[in-house]
Image (cartoon, grey):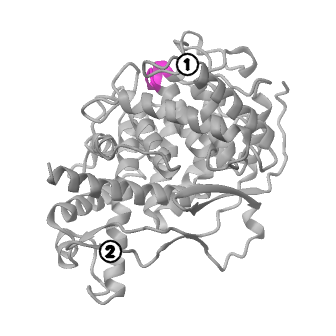
Amino acid sequence: MKFSAMTTTITTALVGAAVGGFVVFSSLPDSGTLETSSQQQIQDDDTDLTLVKGRKTRHAGSKIKVQPPQPIPEFVNNGIAWLVEAQHSSGGWGAGSHAQQTNIDPAKVKLDPATTAFAGMALMRAGHTPVQGVYRDAVRKTTEFLVDVVEKSKAEGPRITDMTGTQPQAKLGQLVDTTMTTQFLSRVITSLPNKDPLHDRASKALDKCLLKLQSSQQKNGSWGSGGWAPVLQSSLGTTALELAQVAGKQVDMEDLRRARDYQKGNFDPSTGKANASAAAGVELYAFAGAQRATAGEARAAQQLIDEAKKNGKLEPADTVNLENLRKIGVDDDKARELADADIASKAQIARLNDENLLRGFGNNGGEEFLSYLMTSESLVITGGESWKAWNQKIIDRLGKIQNPNGSWNGHHCISSPVFCTAAVIQCCTTDRDAVTLIQIAQNATKLRQAASQTAGTR
């Protein structure tokens, strides 16, 4: 492998197209060549967000509309090129062991599924799939590597590997390989043609991972302890369920509800503070997970109010609150949930200029980069000007600390340059997954509604 910096300009952009409930990733020219005056409009065949007095209410859009993504910054392109060069010939990457955090040479570490999946997702978000993009061969090798790992794993138990002591496991939790691989496979199966030999293998591997993930969830909605900051593993597990649902897999509605509630429960809107007891005492980690879990319902609340104003049911100056949601016919329990989510989301956004929060542990590790990624995804989901301000802030922040060779590495805990670089790439290209993220939000909201109805019939 070579590790010299590359300056290849990546001219592919990632967009998701919701087709029949699936997200299909397409490789397009860089957004600088797109018609910026028009929006990407992706058909969503069922975007009802809640029940209003027994009937379905559709958002004014039966389409998910997102602006064309921003061009990938050149410093991020350099990081992508470095990541591809760091890939082993087998298709995998490794983060190294917790016992040897000072070893940050990606050529001299054991390969692990979590890091491989995380790196693969970074390439996919940047516009590369097993069949499209400049780095399609790298993503295909990643897919083959992970499918092989899952196929060889034991049917029983929640884990897909016998490896122990990796940096992601020690810091995020023992099930991080399962959660990360579930996420990757959920993304990749929507990009593989049905006739592709990898499609059915990847789909079956996802089924196996999803069964392991759902069976290992705790009663409180988390995925247990076993790591330095297990709240992050639980957040990754929540996202894994969401992505699997978007990919067309059956996800237990109650599992998803409990997973989101666990994350949201770590944040107190009245104080603006997050409970860091499952986050190694670092508020940032719990804060980012709670924000990510809140974003979907916050978006749903705003969409309902916006639609009501367009239809003349509310005044133009009316805002999201419990009274207005009730006024437009949202049932009391659901109205309270949505109003609470809006309050929490606004309180979370208000803290994004708090440097004491953002510095996390005190210096950057993989956990900080992962937390920034979750906040970026949250703001893409909620929409509006907040994402633009945050995106510029985080791009400036991360661009200043890049290594000369194009990578990033941590200075505590997860020091791996592969893990850290993959997190930064995804963080700085989050808008390229806007359709996917919004679909996740809508699906999760609908699942919560259905779960409430089911509970009411018991």
Residue 57 marker: 2
Instruction: Say what amino acid the circle numbered 2 marks.
Output: Thr
Instruction: Say what amino acid the circle numbered 1 marks.
Output: Ser
Q: Position of residue 135 (x, y in %)?
A: 79, 43
Q: Nearer the viewer, residue 310 or 419?
A: 310
Considering the image in quadrants, where does the N terminus appear?
top right
Marks 1 & 2, CB-CB < 8 Å contact: no
Question: Mark 1 or mark 2, which has the lower sequence index?
Answer: 2
Res. 294 in view: yes
Could you tell me which residue is drawn at 74 percent across and 28 percent down? Answer: 91
Q: Is residue 172 magenta?
A: yes
Q: Is residue 273 magenta?
A: no
**Which residue is labeled 1 in the image?**
153
CA distance separating discs 1 and 2: 44 Å
Q: Nearer the viewer, residue 419 or 74?
A: 419
Q: Determine whether 321 is above or below 97 in the image.
A: below
Chain part drawn in magenta: 169-175
Under circle 1, the secondary element is loop
